[in-house]
Amino acid sequence: MIKPYIITVTFFLALTYEVRAQVDSLYHFESTGNPVITHKFTADPSAFVERDTLWLFTGHDFAGNQKGYQMKDWCVFSTTDLIHWTEYPTPLKITDFAWDRTGAAYAAQTIKRNGKYYWYMSTNGSGIGVAVADRPEGPYKDALGKPLLTNADCFASKHYWTCIDPTVIIDNGQAWLFWGNGVCYYAKLKANMIEIDGEIKKIDFDHLKFTEAPWIHKRKGKYYLSYATGFPEKIAYAMANHIQGPYHYKGILNEIAGNSNTNHQAIIEFKGQSYFIYHNGAVQPNGGSYSRSVCIDKIYYNKDGSMKRVSMTTEGVQSGTGRK
C-alpha cells in the first residue's frame, strides 16, 4: 500500500512543478519579420527605451477568428536588437482593477518616473486607470483603487467608449496625459503620476478628424501628435511648437493596416533609428480586426522635421541598427 501513495505524491509534485514553471518562466523567441509576434495575438502597442533595451507593451486579443474584442490582460516583451525577444509572465489583468465593469483590457501605455513604472490603461466604458510596478516587466498593481479618468471627465463627448487610449509624456519635468475617442483630451499629471493636475482640455484638429489612438512624442523641440483617423483607420499626425498646441495637420503616416479595421501606433527612437510600431490582422489563417498582431517598420524624418509616410513591410526590421 505504500508504493502507490509515493507514486501519487511524486506525480502531484511533478505536475505542480510543471505548472509553476509555466507561470514563472520566460518565453524567448526570434522575430523573422512582420508580424513580430506570431505565437499569440497582440494589439495596441506602446514602447519605451531604457538603456540598451526596448520594452514593448501590448494588448492581448484572446484568440484567432474572433467576432468581437476579447481582451482580458496585457503583455510585456523586451529586446536589445529587435530580433531576439523575451516575453514575461502576464504582468497585468483587467481583473486587477476591481472597479472595472467591462472586462475589456483596452489600449495602454507605460512610462518610468522616480524609479517606478506607471502603466496607464483603458477599458470599454469604466474609464482609464493606472497601475504601478518596481520593474518594467511587473507585476503591476492598481495604484488608485479607482479610475483616474471617467466619461464624466470627457466633457465634449456623449458616447460611452470615449475615455480610452491614454498616451503619456514627461516634458521638461511635467507629465502630460492625452486620451480619447472622437475627441482628443489632455491634462497635466501631478508629480505622483496618479492624479490629474488642473483643467482637462481638448485639441481641435484642423484637418483629418481625430478618431482615437493618440500618441505624443517630442523630437528636436517639436511636438508630434499622431492619431487614428476614419474607419477603417489610417494614422495621421499633427505638429506643434508647444505641447498644448496649436497642432497643425501634416499628413498620413500609414494607410489602412492590412486585414484590420483599427490602427494603433507607437513612435520611438532606438539605437539611432526611429521606428513605427503598429498592429495589423496579418497572421493567417486566423488574423483579423479582432485577432491582431504587432508589427515594426522604420520611420524617417524630412529635413524640416516632418515625417515621411511609413512603408509597411512583410520583412520588417532585421536588426536594431536600422539595416533591412
Image: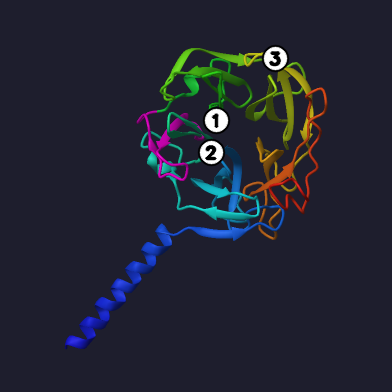
- Residue designated by label 3: 241
Residue 216 in the magenta stretch? The answer is no
Question: Residue 173 at x, y = what percent?
Answer: 51, 19
Mark 1–mark 2 CB contact (< 8 Å): yes
**N-term-proximal mark, 2 vs 3:** 2
Q: Residue at x 60, y 40 (%)?
A: 44
- Binning the other alpha carbons within 10 Å of mark 2 as few (below 14), some (14 to 19) or many (20 upward) gives many
Q: Residue at x 57, y 37 (%)?
A: 48
Q: Dot 2: what SS?
A: strand
Which span is picked out in magenta?
122-146
Q: Residue at x 37, y 32 (%)?
A: 143
Q: Which is in the foreground here, disc 2 or disc 3?
A: 3
Judging depth in this view, the residue of 281 and 239 nearest the camera is 239
| Distance (Cα) linking label 3 and label 1 | 26 Å
**Horizontal relation, residue 139 to residue 50: left or right:** left
Q: Which is in the foreground here, disc 3 or disc 1?
A: 3
Q: Residue at x 54, y 52 (%)?
A: 62
| Distance (Cα) linking label 1 and label 2 | 7 Å
- Binning the other alpha carbons within 10 Å of mark 3 as few (below 14), some (14 to 19) or many (20 upward) gives some
- Residue designated by label 1: 164
**N-term-proximal mark, 1 vs 2:** 2
- Residue designated by label 2: 106
Q: Amino acid at mark 1?
A: Ile
Question: Residue 91 at x, y = what percent?
Answer: 44, 46
The chief SS type of the magenta part is: loop
In the rendered view, tell whether residue 234 sits above or below residue 259. Answer: above
What numbered label is drawn on residue 226? none
Q: Dot 1: what SS?
A: loop
Q: Is residue 216 visible?
A: yes
